[in-house]
Amino acid sequence: MTPASSSDRIIIFDTTLRDGEQSPGASMTVAQKVQIAETLEAMGVDVIEAGFPIASEGDFEAVFRIAERVRDSVVCGLARAAYGDIDRAAEALEPAARKRIHTFISTSPLHMKFKLQMEPEQVHERVVDSVTRARRYTDDVEWSCEDGSRTEHAFLFRCVESAIKAGATTINIPDTVGYAYPEEFADLIRLIRDNVPNIDKAVLSVHCHNDLGLAVANSLRAVQAGARQIECTINGIGERAGNCALEEAVMAIRTRQDLLPYQSRIVTKDIMKASRLVGAVTGFAVQPNKAIVGANAFAHESGIHQDGMLKNAETYEIMRPEDIGLTKSNLVMGKHSGRHAFKTKLKELGYDLGDNALNEAFVRFKRLADKKKDVWDEDLIALVDDEIASESQLVRFVRLRVACGSDVRPNADLTLGVEDEEKRAEAEGDGPVDATFNAIKQLYPHHAKLALFQISAVTEGTDAQAIVTVRLEEDGRTVDGQSADTDTLVASAKAYIAALNKLLTKRARTAPAALSA
Ligand code: KIV
Ligand code: ZN
């Protein structure tokens, strides 16, 4: 046993802000990234991968701001095996109390030949050079072999050994394309431990993608084989099918101590809060049957299950909802509830808003309570999520009036705020939603394509708020926007505008293809 693998402590490395943001559709503003980083820090995440500083000015600024704010967690910046990337990452991490540079290069035959167009010897040289360069700036250097699970073993062992010799303190083995199978991946970790002579000088880490739905299983089997860092994301977001879900890995370890006798520092009762925040900011609704954080994860529908639950919750529940910070859904408050009660309720739901955001949310709550007899927890969550998602938008929703019906050509009269100006337009369409979206296009011309339009209800009843998701695509970029309102057309307009704002942020970024190692 190497010293690292004999410890029962698992390091949780969260990459929601880097790999998670690479999800098609997801994008976050700098302020939202800082808010997520603070939430991750409070929940006990050991390492926060805050971004890829060379990617754009926005990525650089996000890493810099997070490095200024976060004190307990290590703040990490990603860099390809190139001096420019590494120097830029170091610059962005400059204010951090604890910093890590994470540098990577592909090592599989397929990636070296077709993507990098480099010989293995050249790649090996870059491994040594990049880690050596990163060590100029910090003692905490992580090295990753991209497509590690499809790399020839002898070459992998050699690169890992050289990276450690050059100063890497964490060695990360990614299953970049989500191809690995749990037993096979655990064997790979064992083989690395048995064949790399200096492996005891580094922490072994794993980074699993979910293309076959095996990311969590692969990560946990790797831990049983000696890995001591899991790279993961909130809600499992990430490239393609996503990454290992933090909440699933952490709760599996906590629940199955008989098989997984390890410990993480995660404060599990903060899980729901982090999940909601990431869902709201990215516009990625969590599927209802998603493990741990899905709306149905602790719901019991069948009579037999309900009967068992009433007699003893352990009959059908292996975890307690309160362990992940889930409170019972309550009928909250009415239009007479005060600001203090509103603030207390939000705290209970896991939201800690600043004064301005709280005031805005309170005004919206009063409006909602005027329209809707019963305001439930879910209504408040949708309302606050909306507030968080719409912060600092360039294009703002102001007002909408729509005429439609069986004998009217649908027509929308829309006012938007663009920077400090208000603009108004009228447009017709095939239906009221089409007319609304046409009005947005008139006011803010763009050529993005509508790729998804989805409506669901926040609660039951005909007065329920509608939650609308809009996906826009433009020049290979995909963004999702989400919004909730008692008026489905207003929610649709706001969701479209949320997506449009994200597109504007993304336009400023380097094309993703230019960023591969
Ligand atoms: O999936 C991957 O290989 C990565 C690396 C940059 C660690 O995200
Ligand atoms: Zn990845």
Image (cartoon, rainbow, N blue to C red):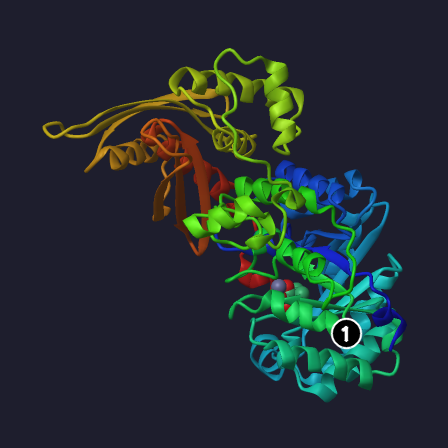
- Which quarter of the rendering shows the C terminus? bottom right
The answer to whether residue 64 shows anywhere in this view is no
Residue of label 1: 127
User: How crowded is the residue under tag 1: few (<14 C-alpha within 10 Å), some, or many (20+)?
Assistant: many
In this view, 297 is above or below 436: below
Direction from residue 477 to residue 109 in the image, left or right: right
- Which quarter of the rendering shows the N terminus? bottom right
- Pinpoint residue 498: horizontal percent, then vertical percent: 46, 36
- Closer to the camera, 145 or 190? 190
The answer to whether residue 63 shows anywhere in this view is yes
Mark 1 CB near ligand 1 (8 Å cut): no
Direction from residue 390 to residue 432 in the image, left or right: left
Q: Residue at x 64, y 80 (%)?
A: 183
Quadrant of the rendered image containing residue 233: bottom right
Direction from residue 478 to residue 184 in the image, left or right: right
Query: For numbered disc 1, what is the local secondary structure?
Result: helix
Q: Residue at x 66, y 55 (%)?
A: 251
Q: Residue at x 68, y 39 (%)?
A: 34
